[in-house]
Amino acid sequence: MPAEGGALLHSHGLSPTKQHAVVVPWPGQGHINPLLHLSRTLAAQYGFSITFVNLDYTHRLLLKSLHKEALVEQAQPSDPTSVAELDIKFVSVPDGIPVEASCTSNVPELSAGVVYSAPAFERLLTELRPRPTCIIADIFVGHTQDAANKLGIPCVAFWTQSASCFAAHVAAARGLFPSELEEGKLIESIAGAPPLRFKDLPGFLQAYKEPDFMFNFVTKPFTRLEEAHCVLMNSFAAMEGGALETLRQQMTGCRIYTIGPVLPLDFFSGKKLSNNGFNKIPGFWGEDYSCLEWLDAQKECSVLYVSFGSIALLTDEELQEFALGLEATGYPVLWVLRPGILEDGGRVSLPPGFQERTQGRVHIIDWAPQLHVLAHPSVGAFFTHAGWNSTLEGVSQGKPLLGFPYFADQMLNCRCIQDLWGNGLALERHGEGLLTRSIVESKACTVMSDAKLRETALLLRDGARRAIISGEQGSSTSDLHHFVESLSL
């Protein structure tokens, strides 16, 4: 049921023809972000009314940030493009997760919460007024299709990851994983991906021989995509055209629209981001905007930005090697060390003397306004866990990437960064080439200085901009128009 005080942004009356979209993310920061960007675009450019449905657990985490954002918007002069003026309301549904739980990195527990929320979500749909005209749901929230079928509402499947990762999930769901999965053989049949080792596959798919809860959770929705109105994919043709073409040929009963990178329009302008509400996303942790002042004092393209996202965990040994490797580069570093980043839940402890030796050169914060940081001219490269949002954000700003994958799609993204797109390098978490301070130093210096990596990164940036800011000629902008038209039909 809607959480008390859930409607945090202004709401307006609906005309008889106005679309009312119920938007449902999987409960992780990296899944919430693109759907919130999309919701704002649909509300601002197409007049949609949006009901954004979180689990109780994530709603509680986001509530303070949402209130703060709304207050900031209300304190500014009236602006017809203000986020606070959009017809977006936030509600939540029960998830069975204890109030005192701390599970932002516990993917199985969050996914179990998604399953638990199904009956409450269906009740919410029947009570919303005006009646929803469509559901736009993360593919991993599979119960939304059941509710849509029962109530006769079109359900749109939103894919937050890459096209090649989508292809891997389709193959797993259809039982088509190739014979190359035998020990030691490379997998060459995943559309849009370079030859892959077993450990490069999306993490939850690696249980295909002995399916578990998470394998079934992430693959079952792919057996039902033909029931969906369409699939919206957060990618773009210039980056993943081959994979997208193959998918459309293989899935003739499923319309696929590519509308990415799903980010604020200002992010493609080539300028620093303003404090416009469109350029801010409510997060699980407070964003430290003071880091932008530190960036202002650095030289152009001189800073290595380091952030491993909202879920990845590090061992203390990895943290020590990172610290000493980053110190050895000699570059200015903006490093995000969020609360709870260590696997054992312990307190972050940096090497003896590290902070004294790097004072003024290594700036450490809990959480960054990442869009603003990546758009800053002082940032030269991005050291990332290679989640798809972070990958697209770095690509859209032409930043060479250094990937250190943790789970899910990140291993596959790292292989594409290094061996397919050529816009960066990757570190190994397990196996050969284990993480050491010397490897961190060497690869970090390369992504900061290599002219070929930077040239390729800038070409990908230009492809992203053409997809988004070229009016109806842009591939992603055109697909978004066609998607909205399909709902009207």
Image (spheres, helix red, strand yellow):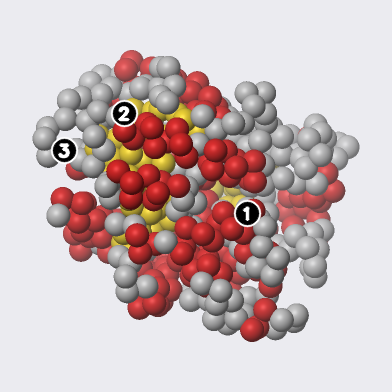
Q: What is the CA distance from the residue labelled 3 to the residue labelled 2?
A: 18 Å
- Could you tell me the amino acid type at mark 3? Lys
In the rendered image of this protein, does residue 293 appear above or below residue 141?
above
Question: Is 193 on the left or on the right of 86, as rendered?
Answer: right
Residue 274 at least partly seen:
no
Q: Which residue sits at x=35%, y=64%? A: 226
Q: Earlier in the sequence, mark 3 or mark 1?
A: 3
Residue, disc 3? 18
Within 10 Å of the Cα at label 2, are there few (<14), some (14-19), or many (20+) other Cα atoms? Answer: few
Q: Earlier in the sequence, mark 1 or mark 2?
A: 2
Seen at 53% across and 67% down, the residue is 173
Q: Position of residue 27 (x, y in %)?
A: 52, 40
**Is tag 3's residue or tag 2's residue first in the polypeptide sequence?**
3
Mark 1–mark 2 Cα distance, whole angstroms, equals 31 Å
The residue where tag 1 is placed is 214
Query: Disc 2 on helix, strand or loop?
Result: helix
